Amino acid sequence: MTVLRNRLILLICMFLVAPAMASAQTPSFVNDVEPILTRYGCNQGSCHGKGSGQNGFRLSLRGYAPEWDHVWITREFSSRRINPTNPEASLLLQKPTGQAAHEGGVLMTKDSPAYMVLLDWISAGAPGINKDEPSVRRLKIDSGKRTLKAGDTTQLRVTAEYSDGQSKDVTWLTKFDSNDAGVAAVNAAGLVKMERSGETAVRAMFAGQVAVVLLTAPHQIAGKAEWYAARNNFIDDHVFKKLADLHIEPAPLCDDATFIRRMYLDAMGVLPTPEEVRAFLADKNGDKRARLIDWVLERPEFVDFWTLQMNDLLMNRKESDHDVRGTKGVRGFHDWIRQQVARNRPWDEMTRELLTVTGATHEQPAVGYYIVNVGEQRESHKSSVVANAAQTFLGVRIGCAQCHNHPLEKYTQDDYYHFAGFFSRIRLERKDPKMGPTNLVVSLPDVKQNKNPIGVTQPRTGKFLPPQSLDRVANKINPDQDPRTVLAAWVTDTRNEFFAGAMVNRIWAHYFSVGLVEPIDDLRESNPPTNPELWRALVKEFVAKKYDRKLIMRLILNSRAYQLGSQTKPANEKDLRFYSHYYVRRLQSEVLHDAIYTVTGIPDSFDGYPVGLRAVQIPDPSVRSPLLAVFGRPERITACACERSSDVTLVQTLHLLGSDENVRKISAANGRLMELLKSKKSDTELMDELMLVTLARLPNDRERKLFMSHLDSGRGRAAAFQDCLWALVNTKEFLFNH
């Protein structure tokens, strides 16, 4: 008891005298100690920063809650981690220097700056948070050189600008990361080495602030000027300038047969018919690609296909439990989305309606967006609608900030809950579909409380936070006002680059396979576009043309960059980010399903839908289909674009090779092949027809010879052609868009 009493007295004295001991030279817990814990990885998720801590010691993840960290370091377990009377004996110093057993190993030496800061802080009485001390407002990086050669090094220097106007070199306290360590590796001290030719961003993180620098290492041999000369529109100006800067050779244009198949599949998810291919190949007009693009963008298949993409984006599905819309509600929202796509409704108008919709599901199908995001959560601001709305409409991932500050960006817990305040007044009056429609109203459960200020309580600090946009500009919202109207106005403001950029990036990634920003729905300052000038030009054009999605698609499809071939050369085979060639990719699950339907002429039956309906047209992602499941159809559970898988797996290969269903369709008496066999077409004509319907091209000499050899093998004409079609359906050329 005597020992415990002495420790308590010592602890009380320490905190009573700490303010007096602190001076202008005393290290700040927030500005000096916390950055050390972050810089050396102590508060990372792999160490003491995970929820349960490690070996009895926990810290807030990356220092998002310094008030908790100070208590855990100085007071937990009878203050055993610091020793004010003998600071050098503190566990906080002995463990990272290896003087005491430490699972994390030796992190610093006794003569290091980090050790001296911690020693001075403990010696000063381990003072806590001073609310009056300046905070970091901005980071700046001085890289010395931004264009280097492979093998070169450059030292980054980071300066922190504080709220009181002072600036300080914080390089030694900064945590560095490279967006692509294969191009540029950076060590803990900020020394960058260019590993190979290319371009990438390096991030610097300090005290909750992030800054980036773009580092470039062109290929050794400059490209020929004529490689970059031919251009169709401003997209090509920026793409080919970047390729020229990096000395990357672009692929030549794809041929007409490749173009028509590529564009049909990318723009409307269907294969061109043999008749369409023949007509296009025979057309000698110089503008035939542009005219074909215009025609495709007006076809109903284009509307169907982009209705599917928008249904994915808006997560249109039945609820996992206690669904209140049913299939009818999913179809209603699907039909509403299709109407918007068909009329090419501006994205800002559509977004405002989605964000501010009220009413019953049978009258306002867009209420379905809130039903799947809010679900049964009685307090809407605690539901997934907060994070999902930011990711869907802004391409910003703030979900992690619900529990802790964003690990790679400036967004804090306060930012998240300020944003959540916009959804704090919506309420779903849920009903079983048999009892009537579910209704969305703007009101608290107790209408008498609607006169109170609008906002939510931050669970960690207990502070009441009014609605505030992610740019941290305060909003004045009256208690009787729907806060979502203010949110919708900010989201769709022409100055909000995230709103326009999110949609532009989604469209770009759809046609080029890789977004200007990757992941495509993770826009942030620390994840800059691979071609910033092109990004700004596209965003500017999208805003200037009133958020016309089809206009951006037309620009992309007409660009020379989109029409480049997919074949690579040694000079560009490693390029996966700068669009020197078309990036080959597997067909989407629904597109592949429909392509097999087109080739065989035999449809699948989907429960509850008429026979002959294409998979692209099915509103409900829960409709059973083994092929769609195997090939990555999304369940629309999250707002993340990653939910739709484009991976290539062994299971997919086995599914196609061993599919009795495909064999049945190919050999069906009422299928395309059997109808062709009944015609008077020659073997050569039949071969041409099958090649055109599957690959949108005619066979080459080697393929003709191979097929004729198989035809003479004694299998019989029908069986030989069935083998041929089965083989074509299983080729990479059929399964991939190139």
Image (tube, rainbow, N blue to C red):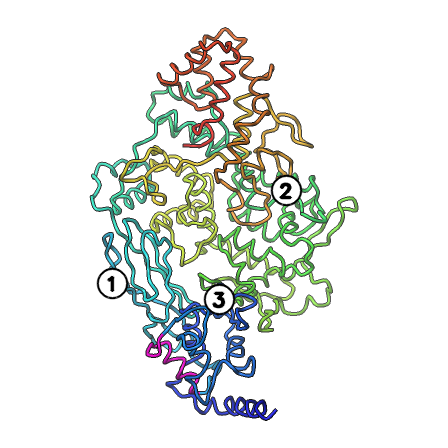
Is 566 on the left-hand or right-hand side of 694? left
Is 300 on the left-hand or right-hand side of 607? left
Residue at 55% over, 27% down: 658
Assess whether residue 120 is covered by the magenta stretch.
yes
Q: Is residue 75 above or below residue 425?
A: below
Instruction: Pinpoint residue 546: horizontal percent, then vertical percent.
Output: 46, 46
Instruction: Answer whether labels 2 and 3 touch (C-beta < 8 Å).
Output: no
**Mark 1 = which residue?**
144
Q: Which quadrant would the C terminus be assigned to in this image?
A: top left
Describe the element under mark 1 as helix, strand or loop: loop
* Amino acid bearing label 1: Gly
Of the two numbered discs 3 and 1 on the same chain, state the one appearing first in sequence: 3
Report crowding for label 1: few under 14, some 14 to 19, many 20 or more residues within 10 A (C-alpha): few
**Mark 3 = which residue?**
47
Point out the stretch of residues depicted in magenta.
109-124
Task: Depth check: give the residue in front, 556 or 584.
Answer: 584
Assess whether residue 519 is covered by the magenta stretch.
no
* Amino acid bearing label 3: Cys
